[in-house]
């Protein structure tokens, strides 16, 4: 009983000796995290004011934040008496093991660095990545965030983004709008061509440098298929797409140009009816 009481007293003394260190370490940790948060806010504002590429800002911010927090944890560990050299060696060994287990994730990190260096796309660009078409919202350490045209949020790992074909639709700030119009064979092509050109000129946000193309694309069974190709900026693509169709339909109706459709003609020869589609 005396031995138990003696050991209990020793334990109590050790806890009392450790208590100030533990409390101090907790306070330093909490205050340190608060200070890091403030520092990161100032760093982000500084990077924004400096004109740093907006693609790089979230990437660098996350890296700096992780580095500062690791340094804080090491400082707190030293306060409570943990040997930091051994701690660093342990972290290194754990990092090696985790790195081997997360080779794919590290590959996404490396791909993120390559995206920031070679810039196949930037924040705000309209892109087609892995079949996903939309605007790049953010380039993160491991992922690229895309907002699709139907307002969906798509998260694409950077490794997958760079492993396939990337189509940057904003690269030249100009997109061709592909439209098709069916014209009856009996109508005069040059007349219809002029009507469609006038309709395009009345289409809001349609561009005329380069000049739109209006030509015969193919001969179908019941009509001529016309290729109508105006231009627009990536931001105005769908406005021009729908607006042009609407104006073309109105213009053709105004000039009594009927929409081509399958028809059947019946001729009477020698008292017998002969039909032709």
Image (tube, rainbow, N blue to C red):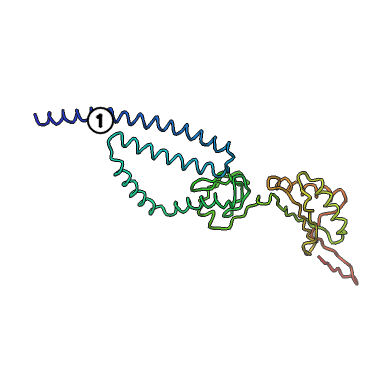
Estimate the x, y position of residue 219 in percent, counting from the top left. Answer: 79, 64
Residue furthest right as drawn: 270
Q: What residue is shown at x 86% (from left), y 65% (from top)?
A: 266
Nearer the observer, 61 or 148: 61
Estimate the x, y position of residue 220 in percent, counting from the top left. Answer: 77, 64
Estimate the x, y position of residue 149 in percent, counting from the top left. Answer: 63, 46
83 to 276, vertically: above or below: above
Residue under pointer 1: 18
The quadrant of the image that shows the C terminus is bottom right
Q: What residue is shown at x 57% (from left), y 37% (from top)?
A: 48
Q: Count the numbered circles shown.
A: 1
* Quarter where residue 193 is shown: bottom right
The quadrant of the image that shows the N terminus is top left
The reply, left or right, for residue 56 in relation to residue 265 is left
Q: Residues within 10 Å of mark 1 (few under 14, many from 20)?
A: some
Q: What residue is shown at x 34% (from left), y 31% (from top)?
A: 26
Nearer the observer, 12 or 129: 12
Residue furthest left as drawn: 2
The reply, left or right, for residue 186 in relation to residue 6 is right
Q: What residue is shown at x 57% (from left), y 41% (from top)?
A: 52
21 to 186, vertically: above or below: above
Nearer the observer, 167 or 48: 48
26 to 112, vertically: above or below: above
């Amino acid at each position: 009983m005396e031995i138990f009481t003696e050991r209990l007293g020793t334990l109590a003394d050790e806890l009392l000796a450790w208590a100030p260190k533990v409390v101090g370490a907790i306070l330093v940790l909490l205050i340190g995290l608060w200070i890091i948060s403030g520092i990161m806010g100032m760093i982000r504002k500084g990077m924004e004011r400096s004109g740093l590429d907006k693609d790089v800002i979230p990437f660098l911010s996350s890296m700096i934040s992780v580095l500062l927090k690791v340094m804080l944890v090491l400082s707190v560990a030293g306060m409570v008496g943990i040997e930091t050299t051994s701690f660093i060696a342990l972290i290194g060994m754990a990092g090696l093991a985790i790195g081997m287990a997360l080779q794919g994730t590290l590959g996404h990190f490396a791909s993120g660095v390559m995206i920031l260096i070679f810039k196949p796309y930037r924040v705000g660009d309209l892109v087609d990545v892995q079949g996903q078409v939309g605007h790049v919202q953010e380039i993160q350490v491991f992922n690229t965030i895309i907002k699709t045209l139907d307002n969906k949020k798509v998260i694409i790992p950077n490794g997958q983004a760079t492993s396939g074909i990337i189509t940057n639709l904003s690269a030249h700030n100009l997109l061709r709008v592909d439209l098709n119009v069916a014209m009856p064979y009996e109508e005069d092509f040059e007349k219809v061509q002029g009507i469609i050109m006038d309709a395009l000129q009345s289409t809001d946000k349609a561009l005329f440098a380069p000049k739109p193309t209006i030509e015969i694309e193919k001969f179908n069974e019941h009509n001529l298929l016309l290729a109508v190709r105006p231009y627009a900026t990536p931001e105005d693509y769908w406005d021009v797409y729908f607006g042009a169709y609407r104006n073309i339909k109105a213009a053709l109706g105004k000039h009594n140009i009927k929409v081509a459709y399958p028809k059947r003609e019946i001729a009477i020869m020698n008292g017998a009816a002969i039909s032709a589609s």
